[in-house]
């Protein structure tokens, strides 16, 4: 279900970043992927790592220049 991921750095703020992940299904990410046991340590560590709560949102691509295999 996973396609690709991109980590972006904010040029205005060195400690601010955005992780963009491309998945086949948003429902699968919420219902299945977020609940996988191997992610538990990551989810527990996030409040200590982030300066504000994580924002999970859906973005729709306007174009794709990367060929999916």
Image (tube, rainbow, N blue to C red):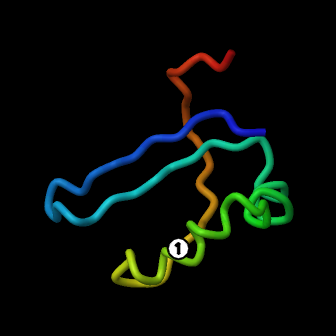
Q: In the rendering, at what x and y percent does residue 29 appear?
A: 76, 57
Residue toward you, 27 or 44: 44
Q: In the rendering, at what x and y percent does residue 14 appear?
A: 17, 60
Is 38 rendered above or below residue 46?
above
Residue at point 78% right, 60% down?
36
Q: In the rendering, at what x and y percent does residue 15 appear?
A: 22, 65
Residue toward you, 62 or 44: 44
Instruction: Tell me the crowding category of disc 1: few under 14, some 14 to 19, or many 20 or more residues within 10 angstroms, Cα based.
Output: few
The quarter of the rendered structure image containing the N terminus is top right
Is 49 rendered above or below residue 57?
below
Q: Is residue 29 left or right of residue 54?
A: right
Residue at point 70% right, 39% down?
2
Q: Is residue 27 left or right of residue 23?
A: right
Q: Quadrant of residue 34?
A: bottom right
Q: Quadrant of residue 26?
A: bottom right
Is 32 rendered above or below residue 7?
below
Disc count in the image? 1
Residue at point 76% right, 63% down?
37
Is 21 rendered above or below residue 38?
above
Q: Quadrant of residue 40?
A: bottom right
The quarter of the rendered structure image containing the C terminus is top right
Q: In the rendering, at what x and y percent does residue 44 appear?
A: 57, 78
Q: Is residue 36 left or right of residue 48?
A: right
Residue at point 40% right, 46% down?
7
Q: Is residue 42 left or right of residue 39?
A: left
Residue highlighted by disc 1: 55
At mark 1, the secondary structure is: loop
């Amino acid at each position: 279900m996973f396609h690709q991921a991109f980590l972006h750095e904010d040029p205005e703020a060195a400690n601010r970043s955005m992780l963009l992940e491309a998945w086949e299904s948003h429902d699968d990410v919420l219902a299945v992927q977020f609940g996988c046991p191997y992610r538990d340590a990551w989810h527990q560590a996030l409040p200590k790592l982030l300066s504000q709560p994580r924002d999970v949102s859906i973005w729709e691509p306007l174009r794709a220049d990367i060929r999916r295999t």
